[in-house]
Image (tube, rainbow, N blue to C red):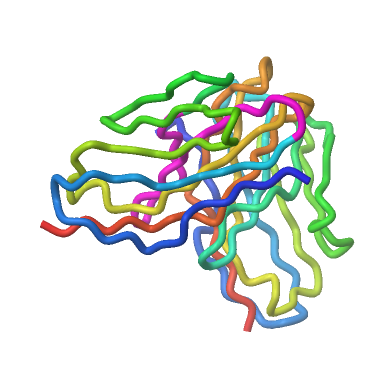
Amino acid sequence: DTGVSQNPRHKITKRGQNVTFRCDPISEHNRLYWYRQTLGQGPEFLTYFQNEAQLEKSRLLSDRFSAERPKGSFSTLEIQRTEQGDSAMYLCASSPSGTTHNEQFFGPGTRLTVL
Amino acid sequence: GNSVTQMEGPVTLSEEAFLTINCTYTATGYPSLFWYVQYPGEGLQLLLKATKADDKGSNKGFEATYRKETTSFHLEKGSVQVSDSAVYFCALKTSNNQGGKLIFGQGTELSVKP
């Protein structure tokens, strides 16, 4: 399967713990996006990378959130000191660079539950 | 700011019925418009897109026309099937957004009964 993969698919944690999610994009795609989706809502943009450079961050991305893409391939999203409000589905997407019309390909998501 | 508004669901239809899911948007410049679909247990998939006014996107029997005058991109299908049951998301990308982030509506759940 050459699509976008995300691990883990599910994560249950206690409030105050740190969690890290991984996203592996489609190999030739140099753009990578993170979104957050809560129940009954559409995905909301968190951040975006062009190769290893993080070029845009949403105001939703508080200082407890950090994302990296160290070699321009896979990316990690870490949430420190998790809160119950962080419970959501975290989606990763990738696309080739070029025009803004390029399709974003989404992974299956990581569902986070904070107890 | 930029935003997308979709009709609220859930929408329940019988097989072979006509489907319309309304989508309107607010955006600066000339956005590109998209419909994504999320089948149960699967990730978001692009269904169709339109990149300029009066363009019609189409795929799998679904169509949507980019109407600049009404700032709308309504999704239609002439005859739905049970397999079309899913959540449908309307989304836009603004033309001045080189990063290409998507702005989504809240989603509309469609349930098709046999």
Q: Is residue B6 above or below residue B68?
A: below
Q: Is residue A17 above or below residue B60?
A: below
Q: Is residue A83 magenta?
A: no
Q: Residue B63 lies in what quarter of the image? A: top left
Write the residue at 68% across / 29% down.
Answer: A31
Write the residue at 85% across / 61% down.
Answer: A62
A92 sits left or right of A80 in the view = left
- In front here: A75 or B100? B100
A59 sits left or right of B110 in the view = right
- In front here: B19 or B68? B68
B98 sits left or right of A114 in the view = right
Q: Quadrant of the C terminus of chain B?
A: bottom left
Write the residue at 74% across / 77% down.
Answer: A83
Write the residue at 59% across / 36% down.
Answer: B71
Q: Is residue B45 magenta?
A: yes
- In front here: B81 or A25? B81
Image location (x, y in percent) of residue A3 = 46, 34
Q: Residue B26 lies in what quarter of the image? A: top right
Q: Residue furthest top?
A: A98
Q: Which residues are magenta?
A: B28-48
Image location (x, y in percent) of residue A51 = 75, 27
Image location (x, y in percent) of residue A107 = 51, 44
Image location (x, y in percent) of residue B37 = 41, 44
Q: Residue furthest left?
A: B114
Q: How many marks?
A: 0
A33 sits left or right of A105 in the view = right
Q: Residue furthest front?
A: B69
